[in-house]
């Protein structure tokens, strides 16, 4: 049976039914700025923008909801992750001028530029907490599913270099601070997705979408041959692949892809059974690219996999075959330089795929970006955790537990473990082995 993931958005497609406008709905959003009982709708008449309307909804003094639509109306479907309350418990005010509208509560302000729909959040003293990318940072790509019109959506925000991002649920990639990194938000056997990101800049953001989503770079990883490959003798076209059975070399070939990811595929069906049972494969050579910058690599594996780049061990993972998973690493490439690579895989009947992505500009990777595959509209909630500057440092200090499984040999001694993560305090533990 082919191993596959079913996107949650497809399962819930019946719950995400698009709301096509009635004549009444079209009239209700026809004006440039329309004040509502608990917020405001802004009509955008700029042909360069994907969004037609932006809506701000005051939830309470500390939470404002932002919804952006590329249609002539907003969806009337109820959220599955937010409990809606009738009316609003907060008093708020609306200010308008020729370029922007500002919605203010006692502790929070949200400003929307009339030309682009760009939203900026500030505290009551006008200190900026978060701002969307210049121009609004909103994109809609039209899709059709089950005969209905949907969009794949993306929202980008500016992020300073010293910002750190946490949250997003429980993931298995060893990532703590997600700044300048990518996270796939798809529920899986060992992954609990919570699309709520917390910033050390004192705010949280809830992304209200249930389909396959991504934090950071939304591109799909590509086959390994999307980067220039050279064999162990320096010839272009692929890596030197050596197949072993019980340390006996049985085959040598040149391969430009490593793709043993899914059952019932030619790659897996034709994989040598003796190598899978009691052997290994070693790929050797080098890689290079005309695209300078930080290249991304992804290793999806079970069995025992190790990867060296320029003789430095970058991946060293063993996983059971019922539970393969991904490991990511990055390599900076300057000019036409080549980097040595060696991949060793003891299959044990498992899975392996090695993939690659070309670099994107540093300033693009540094942004706060959220993307979803299926949506009616962009929908998120902004919540500053506190406006008290004396407490901000406290929220940067996290305490928690890290699970480590240690196996000792027959020799007595000491095992010293040290844990460290960017912007967190190091910790160390000493285990005595008798």
Image: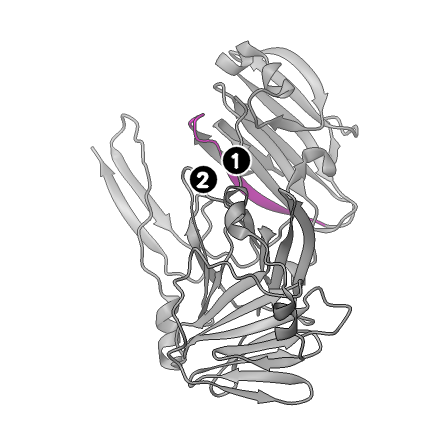
Determine whether 29 is above or below 195 in the image.
Answer: below
Q: Position of residue 191 (x, y in %)?
A: 42, 43
Q: Earlier in the sequence, mark 1 or mark 2?
A: 1
Residue occupying image coordinates x 36% and y 80%? 390
Q: Which residues are magenta?
A: 320-333
> In the image shown, does 14 or 188 lie closer to the viewer?
14
Spatial CA span between label 1 and label 2: 8 Å
Residue occupying image coordinates x 69% and y 30%? 285
Left-right relation of 308 to 333: left
SS at mark 1 in the image: loop
Determine whether 130 is above or below 79 in the image.
Answer: below
Q: Residue furthest front?
A: 23
Tell me if label 1 and label 2 are in contact, CB under 8 Å: yes
> In the image shown, does 77 or 175 lie closer to the viewer?
77
Mark 1 highlights which residue? 5
Residue occupying image coordinates x 51% and y 67%? 163
Determine whether 389 is above or below 146 in the image.
Answer: below
Mark 2 highlights which residue? 188
Residue occupying image coordinates x 76% and y 29%? 234
The majority secondary structure of the magenta stretch comes to strand
For disc 2, the neighbor class at 10 Å (few under 14, some 14 to 19, many from 20) is few
Q: Residue furthest left?
A: 434
Q: Position of residue 394 (x, y in %)?
A: 35, 71
Left-right relation of 232 to 41: right
Judge whether residue 324 is colored magenta.
Answer: yes
Kindly tell me whether residue 131 is visible in this rendering: no
- Residue 432 disc label: none
SS at mark 2 in the image: loop
For disc 1, the neighbor class at 10 Å (few under 14, some 14 to 19, many from 20) is few
Judge whether residue 208 is colored magenta.
Answer: no
């Amino acid at each position: 049976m082919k191993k596959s993931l079913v996107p949650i958005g497809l399962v819930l497609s019946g719950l995400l039914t698009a709301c096509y406008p009635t004549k009444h709905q079209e009239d209700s959003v026809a004006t440039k700025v329309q004040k509502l009982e608990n917020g405001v709708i802004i009509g955008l008449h700029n042909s360069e923008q994907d969004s037609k309307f932006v809506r701000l909804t005051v939830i309470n003094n500390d939470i404002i909801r932002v919804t952006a639509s590329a249609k002539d109306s907003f969806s009337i479907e109820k959220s599955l992750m937010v409990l809606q309350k009738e009316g609003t418990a907060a008093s708020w005010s609306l200010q308008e001028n020729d370029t922007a509208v500002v919605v203010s509560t006692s502790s929070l302000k949200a400003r929307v530029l009339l030309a682009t729909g760009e939203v900026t959040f500030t505290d009551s003293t006008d200190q900026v907490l978060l701002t969307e990318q210049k121009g609004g940072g909103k994109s809609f790509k039209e899709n059709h599913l089950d005969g209905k019109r949907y969009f794949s959506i993306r929202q980008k925000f500016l992020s300073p270099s010293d910002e750190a991002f946490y949250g997003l649920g429980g993931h298995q990639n060893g990532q703590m601070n997600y700044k300048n990194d990518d996270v796939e938000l798809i529920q899986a056997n060992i992954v609990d997705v919570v699309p709520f990101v917390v910033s050390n800049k004192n705010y949280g953001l809830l992304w209200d979408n249930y389909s396959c989503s991504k934090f950071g770079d939304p591109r799909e990883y590509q086959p390994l041959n999307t980067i220039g490959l050279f064999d162990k003798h320096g010839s272009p076209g692929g890596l030197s692949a050596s197949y072993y059975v019980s340390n006996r070399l049985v085959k040598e070939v040149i391969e430009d892809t490593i793709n043993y990811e899914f059952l019932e595929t030619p790659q897996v069906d034709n994989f040598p059974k003796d190598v899978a049972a009691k052997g290994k494969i070693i790929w050797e050579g080098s890689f290079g690219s005309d695209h300078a910058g930080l290249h991304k690599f992804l290793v999806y594996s079970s069995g025992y996999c190790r990867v060296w780049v320029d003789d430095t061990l970058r991946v060293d993972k063993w996983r059971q075959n019922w539970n393969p998973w991904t490991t990511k690493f990055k390599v900076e490439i300057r000019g036409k330089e080549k980097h040595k690579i060696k991949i060793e895989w003891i299959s044990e009947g498992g899975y392996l795929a090695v993939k690659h992505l070309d670099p994107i500009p540093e300033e693009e990777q540094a942004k706060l970006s959220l993307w979803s595959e299926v949506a009616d509209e962009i929908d998120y909630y902004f919540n500053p955790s506190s406006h008290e500057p004396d407490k901000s440092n406290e929220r940067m200090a996290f305490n928690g537990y890290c699970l480590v499984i240690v196996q000792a040999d027959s020799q007595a001694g000491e095992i010293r473990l040290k844990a460290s993560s960017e912007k967190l305090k190091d910790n160390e533990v000493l285990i005595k082995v008798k």
